[in-house]
Amino acid sequence: MKIAILVEGATETAFKPVLLDFLKSRLQQMPKLKFIPHDGRVPKGDKLKRIVENLLIGKDAFNAVIALTDVYTGTNDFQDGADAKAKMREWVGNNPNFYPHVAQYDFEAWLLPYWSTIQKLAKSNKSAPAGLPEKVNHGNPPSYRIKEVFETGKCQRSYNKIRDGARILKDQDLMVSVNQCPELKAFINTIIELSKGDLIP
């Protein structure tokens, strides 16, 4: 099973190692996962359609393509996760081997369950945002919240997704975040299902 995963570049660097470790613990047969990073954000419209179609043809064709986008991309393309998935499906068209997924409202929502680690790295005692991680937004998405903790903490520097995202996730049990983040669970379950594994209930 060969799966291409379209991601925003920095997300790949921060997330890939912990995702692979998690999948290895749950799958007898690991799929070949190729992360295809895009600077800034996953493409949209006809460009996304072309990329997906090209990955599914030819001698090096993938069996499936997953697109993982943030809902909050810095532009107002998407209202929420459901809207983002519907739009990506619309752009790509009726393709059974394309699976749109989202981080709602951005990738950092999946880091919020590890708040004590965020506090430690930022040297801050600021309390975690209230509510479920994927509901945290109100014009102030999770990445902004984490950035604020770093900038007001005693570590005296800003949050960097590549450096700090990876450090927050290092040695963590991804199941903690999966249990609080339905979109993360859906994304991982797509990979597990394509790999003929047992889905996370």
Image (cartoon, rainbow, N blue to C red):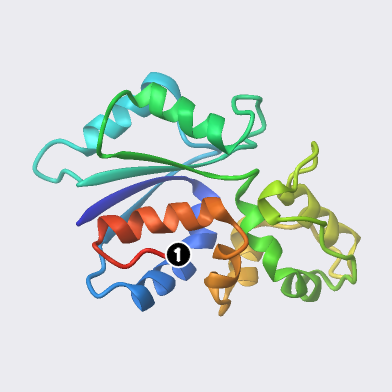
Residue 72 place in picture, x, y as percent: 65, 37
Residue 135 place in picture, x, y as percent: 71, 47
Give the residue at the far left of this rendering: 59
Residue 189 place in picture, x, y as percent: 39, 57
Which of the 4 image quarters holds residue 20?
Answer: bottom left
- Whether residue 194 sits left or right of residue 152 in the image: it is left
- 176 vs 34: above or below: below
Tell me what residue is drawn at x 30 percent, y 33 percent.
Answer: 52
Give the residue at the far front of this rendering: 201
- Whether residue 22 sits left or right of residue 181 in the image: it is left
Residue 187 place in picture, x, y as percent: 44, 52
The kind of secondary structure element at disc 1 is: loop
From the viewer's side, name the closer residue of 151 and 181: 181
Which of the 4 image quarters holds residue 128?
Answer: bottom right
- 91 vs 125: above or below: above
- Whether residue 133 sits left or right of residue 157 in the image: it is left
Tell me what residue is drawn at x 87 percent, y 65 percent.
Answer: 127
From the viewer's side, name the closer residue of 180 and 172: 180
Tell me what residue is drawn at x 23 percent, y 32 percent.
Answer: 54
Q: Give the residue type at disc 1.
A: Pro
How many marks are shown on the rendered structure?
A: 1
Tell me what residue is drawn at x 54 percent, y 61 percent.
Answer: 14
Structural crowding at the residue carrying mark 1, measured as other residues with C-alpha within 10 Å and reported as few (<14), some (14–19) or many (≥20): few
- 160 vs 86: above or below: below
- The C terminus is located in which quarter? bottom left
- 140 vs 167: above or below: above
- The N terminus is located in which quarter? bottom left
Name the residue beneath numbered marker 1: 201
